[in-house]
Image: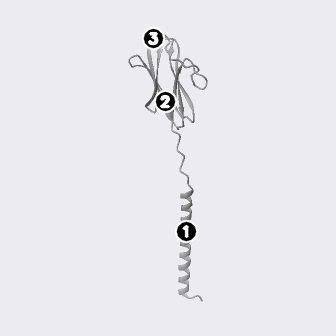
Amino acid sequence: MINRNFQRWFVTVLGLSVALGLAACSKKAADTTTTSAQPPAPAAALTVTGVELGRAVGGDKRVTETVTTFAPNDVVYVSVHTAGSAPSAMLKSRWTYQDGQLIDETEQAIAPNGDEATEFHISKPDGLPPGNYKVEIFLDGVSVQSKDFEVK
């Protein structure tokens, strides 16, 4: 028969060994996780890299010929070029006449990934009145660029 003191000693040593083994394993796993984890790469910030005016845009939504003077019956296009990526962003065009009179304001939700273009335009069935105009571009509510143009 085994001595009761030996049994207690054996159970205690066995329990301590298991506890130390588990602690060592969990410590090693925690260390491995901490040192091998890579921080997520930051998303490329979305920026407006250019704004072009013209009478037409291509399939890529880019102006085919840049101009700043238009006839009253022309459709005035603005192509907004962006770089970077975002899961969602809001582009807005604000068109004003002469002394700041609001002609049109349009928003488009975008989710760009790389270099992209977004198109806005204005026209009137009876023609735009001659004078000086401005289109201002906003990215997520912040004015980022503007272009002046003339209708003659």
Q: Residue at x 60, y 22 (%)?
A: 58
> Can you say whether 131 is above or below 27 in the image?
above
Q: Is residue 128 above or below residue 138?
A: above
- Residue type, mark 3 in image: Pro
Q: Which residue is mark 2?
A: 91
Name the front one of labels 2 and 3: 3
Disc 3 designates what residue?
130
- Determine whether the residue tagged by mark 1 lies in a helix, strand or loop: helix
Determine the CA span between mark 2 and mark 3.
27 Å
Q: Position of residue 112 (x, y in %)?
A: 55, 34
Q: Residues within 10 Å of mark 3 (few under 14, many from 20)?
A: some
Which amino acid, mark 1?
Answer: Ala
Identify the residue under disc 1: 24
Q: Residue at x 55, y 20 (%)?
A: 66
Q: Secondary structure at mark 3?
A: loop
Determine whether label 2 and label 3 are within 8 Å by CB.
no
User: Residue 143 placed where, x, y %?
Assistant: 43, 29
